[in-house]
Image (tube, rainbow, N blue to C red):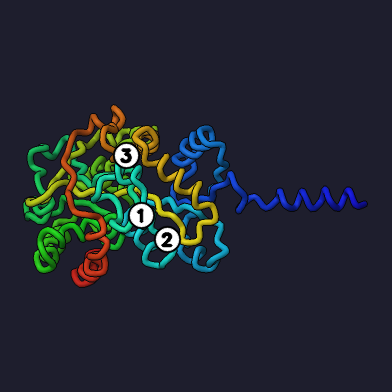
Amino acid sequence: MFLRATTALTALALAAPAFAEGELNVYSYRQPELIAPLTDAFTEATGITVNVAYLKKGMVERMKAEGRRSPADLVFTVDISRLSAVVEAGLTQPVVSDVLEANVPGIYHDPEGHWWGLTTRARIVYASKDRVDPAEVTSYEDLADPKWKGRICTRSGTHPYTVALLSAVIHHQGEEAAKTWLEGVKSNLARKPQGNDRAQVKAIWSGECDISLGNTYYMGKMLSDPDQVAWAESVNVLFPEFEDGGTHVNISGVAMAKHAPNRDNALKMMEFLTSPQAQEIYAEANYEYPIAPGSEASELVKNWGTYSADEVNLMTLAALRPTALRLVEEVDFDG
Ligand code: FE
């Protein structure tokens, strides 16, 4: 009996792995097919087991409810709005690391180290190959020009992708001009905002509109889906710029949880993730752009063209989010 009890105790001790050495717990909004190749490579290199909870929503609420007992070490997500939501809720801790500083350009991380970018995606224009001369698409400002009347399709004005782009317009043009711009884009829409980025390209393919706003990686996703290849092949990927800036980009990123129980392992993973090699694996899996100096996008992604990214720090855009959301309401963009 005694032996059995001892064995049971030992088993119990071993069955509490979340806080033991050699583990790392990740909460991810990103899909398993993107994350698994990285966690597998990390485990192979370090021997550290990575447990990933794939969440669809409610990460902030869950971490708040868990409080100090939260098993989360790292948070993976996309979009500066989602990253800053976790930070603003007080659920992260600053990370200082020479490796991270070397691998992540300054505009793609929080100056205090609460979030770090891993890859970028540009918000670009998909344009009909048949009906739009690529030279016609120039600046984001130009999308409000009446020449596009009845020709633009886009997703909802309240979606984080639209809000981040509008935040960039506010940054470059000021609030008043941004409101006028948004009204101009609205008056150019072929239909009320609806659907996701790929649905807009489908609408170009079917003739409902001529250009749409979308993230670059959806081109790769459409090309890899037999049902959507025709949509992708009906459009060009064009990179508009701001008149006084570059092409609007957003990031996928990582943050360390405030109460990370495996802090050392979490830092190791962050440093691993920002390495040029890991960024390239990650970027290729979702047709994104790695950001480490010397890293390169996949051949497919490079084929879409080159662009110069807008140089605004994404923190600046995150701070403009409430203003952007208010403008979307004021012009009744989705109405
Ligand atoms: Fe997306």
Percent coordinates x, y for residue 261 in the rendering: 54, 56
Q: What's the residue at 27%, 61% (across, down)?
A: 318
Horizontally, residue 83 falls left or right of residue 6, namely left
C-alpha separation, residue under disc 3 versus residue under disc 2: 25 Å
Residue at the spot of label 1: 115
Q: Residue furthest right?
A: 1
Q: Which label was assigned to residue 223?
A: none
**Along the line of sight, the residue nearer the viewer: 250 or 57:** 250
**Along the line of sight, the residue nearer the viewer: 45 or 326:** 45
Q: What's the residue at 42%, 45% (across, down)?
A: 270
Q: What's the residue at 10%, 56% (across, down)?
A: 144
Residue at the spot of label 2: 92
Determine the secondary structure under disc 2: strand
Q: Which label was assigned to residue 288?
A: 3
Percent coordinates x, y for residue 131 in the rendering: 14, 39
- The image quadrant that residue 202 belongs to is top left
Determine the secondary structure under disc 3: loop
Q: Between label 3 and label 2, give the one nearer the viewer.
A: 2
Is residue 192 in view from this perspective? yes
- Whether tag 2 and tag 1 are in contact, CB under 8 A, the answer is yes
What type is the residue that disc 1 sits on? Trp
What type is the residue that disc 3 sits on? Glu
